Amino acid sequence: MHPSGCIYIYLQPNGCIFMRRDVFQGIADPTRRAILGKLAKEKLNLTTLTDNFDISRQSVTKHIKILSECGLVIIEKQGRDRYISARPEKLSEVAKWINQYRSFFAESYDRLDDYLKTME
């Protein structure tokens, strides 16, 4: 993961440039987290997905674009519809980041527990 946590720019073999956002940008917004939650349960087309939220179709489309750039969703065209499905395996980056702090929090809670026992 890039230390800046920003946007990665890649040059594809065919000469095209594409951007990849950091997975943390994808989950930073509560609406995107809710969209991921819906898509984790089932693949949905854009209209059905939009019906689950009190925001415009354009707003949902912008969130889907960001999630796609983060690699958290895949958009597949089937006929005239576009179906969106979650790629929850990409969240492993978040899990790895959290795990590096797990021992820190465990030690902190142990120290707090020891301190609270002295107050009894």
Image (tube, grey):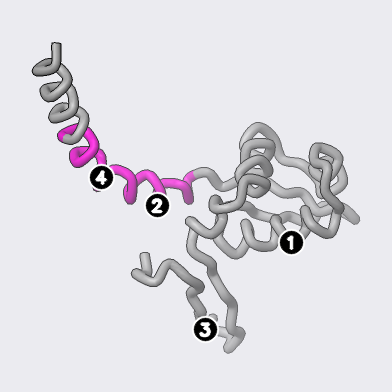
Q: Identify the disc placed on residue 62.
A: 1
The Cα atoms of the two marked residues, 4 and 2, are separated by 13 Å
Q: Earlier in the sequence, mark 4 or mark 3?
A: 3
Q: Nearer the viewer, mark 4 or mark 3?
A: 4
Residue at 90% x, 56% y is: 80
Q: Amino acid at mark 3?
A: Leu
Residue at point 53%, 59% (across, down): 25
Q: Quadrant of the N terminus?
A: bottom left
For residue 27: magenta?
no
Q: Nearer the viewer, residue 118 or 30?
A: 118
- Location of residue 37 with respect to 78 vertically, above or below: above
Q: Are marks 2 and 3 in contact (CB under 8 Å)?
A: no
Above or below 86: residue 18: below
Q: Amino acid at mark 4?
A: Tyr
Tell me which numbered mark, 1 or 2, is placed earlier along the sequence. 1
Task: Give the magenta part as a residue range.
Answer: 89-107
Res 86 label: none
Q: Are marks 3 and 1 in contact (CB under 8 Å)?
A: no
Q: Secondary structure at mark 1?
A: helix
Tag 4 residue: 101
Q: State the separation of the CA atoms marked 3 and 1.
A: 23 Å
| Quadrant of the image containing the C terminus | top left
Mark 1, other Cα within 10 Å: few <14 / some 14–19 / many ≥20: few
Which numbered circle lies on residue 93?
A: 2
User: Counting residues from the N terminus, which is met first, the one under dot 3 or under dot 1?
Assistant: 3
What predominant SS class does the magenta segment belong to?
A: helix
Q: Identify the mark nearer the N-term, 2 or 3.
A: 3
Distance between mark 2 and mark 3 Cα atoms? 22 Å
